[in-house]
Amino acid sequence: MLKEFINKQKRLKTIKYLKKVESNDLISLSEKLLLKAFKRASQKTEAYKDLLIEKKIKSTDIRNVITFKEKVPVINKEIIFPNNKIDRLCLNGSISSIKSVFSSSGYSGIYSFGVNTKKNYRNISKSIDTSLEYLFNISKKKTFMVSCIPMGVKVHTSVPIAETSIRGDMALAIIKKFSAYYDQTLIVGDPYFIKKLAEEGIEQGINWSEFNTSFIFGEDWFSQSFREYIETITGIEPKLENERKVLATMGIAELDLNLFHESKYTVEIRREAQKNAALRKELFGEVISSPVLFHYFPHRTYMECINNELIFSMLSPNLLIPLIRYNSKDTGKLYSYGYIADILKKHNLNHLIPDLKLPFVSVSGRKENCMIYKNEEILPEDIKQTIYENYEVAKKTTGYFRLHKNNNKPIEIQLSKGIKADTKTERLFENQINKYLKVPVPVKVYTYESFPYAMVLDYERKFKFI
């Protein structure tokens, strides 16, 4: 009990600090920690030492953030993981402190790896609990979590948790039996699996409002319309003050599983941007679908954006594999706290200025993921936004579709179980999908069983939209 009380006080103290601190002070701290992290990696990991020698860079030449950005090479998984033994990537060349190992999804064809130590486990748990404290007030509300995250990736938290992976039947059975004993239930998982779970729960008579259920998405990008579809079918009111929420976090296996997180403010900023073309353009540029807008912790991660791609430098001394200037190939944009606040004031949205003084990052997807049809670029993100604006269309699909690069093939859609692939359904999808596209694109729908890219829908892997 004493330990729980102390941890609670630490969480509340952290949140209070992040509300009061000057946002620029957080960035200054991040820059100081960056130089320490670079020095640590350059002196204590053999693979990184060799890389700097190959690039003819002396660590002593990196004296400040300016020289860091001028001289330190940008790396990626192709450079780091295929040709290095794991011990050469670890601090002091030792794997003896490893507590757990996990891999990336393999979506790109190359696997990267994350490792955790006991100390890092404790830090992750504190970080996640602090986020849950801020978002869901877990100190005052008895909270139950159901983790539907696949591939054995665990959520490290102090709240009671059921880990069902992608067994929807197990998750629903547990929710029915246990959720009534708690003030709120949090369900974590891939957005498209949560869609399936929410729909099946309704079919089984679950009243998601009764269990005060919120949903936390991870693993894959989703459109704002997708969030609003889940809100609608599960009875969540889209209000800033609503205690029930649909939120997202983002992690990358080799970096950290809790890199970015949404808040009630970022959710509503994105909602407004999707409705307001002028705000959307000012925040994100000429886009149809608003990116996800996240907070990040600058004392844990130093962020850069080069050619619209996100670059990460991990700052914690407790990370066994320290990655510096790591390009995840995610498309995005960085924003200071002051910049976002100024834009919101300009659009008379002062009430959406976040209380935490953290910086922001928007994430759009992968740069290379697009389809060219009659010389027009078609993005998976825009198809997702369009599909879930029409709830009749949304309910008829698993969420899996396939675009084809540099090819005039139709967009191919997997229908939900029991939905017929007839002409009427095909026209329904075609009319909806072409709502925003500059050139009309044909659509072909498949029954659940006949979709050629998944004999059985595999929620263990990210959907491959391209």
Image (cartoon, grey):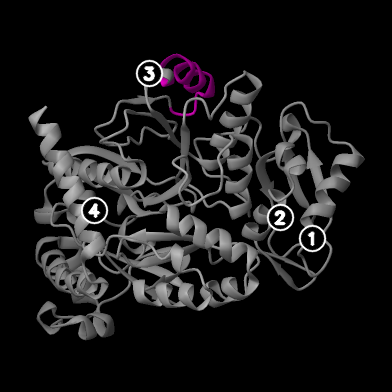
| Residue name at image x 57 percent, y 63 percent | 272
Q: Is residue 307 left or right of residue 33?
A: right
Q: Looking at the rendering, in which quadrant would you find the N terminus?
A: top left
Q: Main secondary structure of the magenta part?
A: helix
> Is label 1 or label 4 in front?
4
Ranked by sequence position, the earlier of labels 1 and 2 is: 2
The image's mark for residue 15 is 4
Q: Which residues are magenta?
A: 165-179
Residue 403, image x, y percentages: 70, 55
Q: Which amino acid type is shown beneath numbered disc 3?
A: Tyr
Number of other residues with Cα within 10 Å of mark 2, as a class: few under 14, some 14 to 19, many 20 or more:
many
Front residue of 389 and 71? 389
**The stretch drawn in magenta includes residue 157:** no
Asked if residue 293 is positioned above or below residue 170 in the image, the reply reads below
Q: Which residue, given by chain and number where applicable, does mark 1 sit on? A: 435
Residue 303 appears in which quarter of the rendering?
Answer: bottom left
| Residue name at image x 20 percent, y 46 percent | 11
Rounded to the nearest angstrom, the CA distance separating label 4 from label 3 is 28 Å
